């Protein structure tokens, strides 16, 4: 993989970054004027190599939700309580003395002690988040719609899971990436 050269359309600063898979769909932030746009908005190729300005400041690639290098977190909407996810299996459930969930987030009587599972899976392009229905006694809703027993669904940042009466939002560890996903 080579080096990609582009020019900021706002300040004409020459920017460069190491080529990564899927860079054509990424958002770039100019380190000089902080203009943010998809790579396709910037001039590239021979036009970029002739631009003025030094390339001393690092170019920031803002990764889209499907190409994330962070593991993510969940946030309880009502309380803003944040719990970090870990690679692998994360069982989420009600906070109870006899609960065995990895992440205990609520005392909601309508939430099971082991309500749902989020598998954080490393892929060639980053991490994917899989919502796994684990046959809890209570239903799970994803973005307001009930999911079926045994379903495995791919989540994206900004998705809202309802466990009992508690809304939980999947977020990037980066606040900026979460805002862009919504």
Image: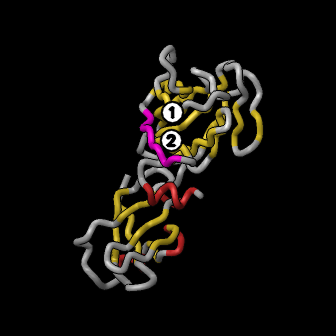
Q: Quadrant of residue 85?
A: top left
Q: Quadrant of residue 12?
A: bottom left
The residue that label 1 is drawn on is 105
The segment highlighted magenta reads: 79-85
Do tag 1 and tag 2 residues touch (Cβ < 8 Å)? yes
| Position of residue 165 measured from the top left corner of the image (x, y, whole percent) | 67, 37
- Quadrant containing the C terminus in the rendered view: bottom right
Please name whichever residue, 108 or 70, is drawn nearer the observer in this view of the structure. 108
Mark 1 / mark 2, whichever is N-terminal: 2
Q: Assess disc 2: are there few (<14), some (14-19) or many (≥20) residues with their C-alpha within 10 Å of its C-alpha.
A: many
Q: Is residue 70 left or right of residue 99?
A: left
The residue lying at 50 percent from left, 60 percent from top is 26
Please name whichever residue, 49 or 127, is drawn nearer the observer in this view of the structure. 127
Q: Assess disc 1: are there few (<14), some (14-19) or many (≥20) residues with their C-alpha within 10 Å of its C-alpha.
A: many
Q: Is residue 77 above or below residue 166?
A: below
Q: Nearer the viewer, mark 1 or mark 2?
A: 1
C-alpha gap between disc 1 and disc 2: 10 Å
The residue that label 2 is drawn on is 74
Question: SS for tag 2?
Answer: strand
Considering every residue shown, the one lying at the far left of the view is: 56
| Position of residue 72 measured from the top left corner of the image (x, y, whole percent) | 46, 42
The residue lying at 56 percent from left, 48 percent from top is 77
């Amino acid at each position: 993989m080579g080096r990609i050269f582009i020019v900021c359309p706002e300040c004409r600063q020459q920017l460069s970054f190491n080529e990564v898979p899927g860079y054509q769909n990424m958002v770039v932030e100019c380190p000089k004027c902080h203009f943010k746009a998809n790579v396709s908005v910037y001039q590239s190729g021979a036009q970029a190599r002739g631009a003025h300005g030094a390339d001393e400041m690092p170019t920031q690639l803002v990764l889209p939700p499907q190409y994330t290098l962070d593991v993510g977190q969940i946030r309880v909407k009502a309380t803003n309580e944040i719990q970090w996810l870990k690679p692998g299996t994360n069982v989420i459930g009600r906070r109870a003395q006899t609960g065995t969930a990895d992440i205990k987030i609520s005392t909601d009587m309508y939430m099971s002690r082991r309500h749902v599972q989020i598998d954080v899976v490393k892929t060639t392009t980053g991490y994917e988040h899989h919502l796994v229905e684990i046959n809890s006694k209570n239903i799970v809703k994803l973005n307001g719609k009930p999911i079926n027993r045994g379903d495995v669904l791919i989540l994206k940042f900004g998705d809202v899971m309802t466990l009992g009466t508690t809304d939980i939002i999947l977020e990037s560890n980066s606040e900026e990436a979460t805002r862009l996903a919504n």
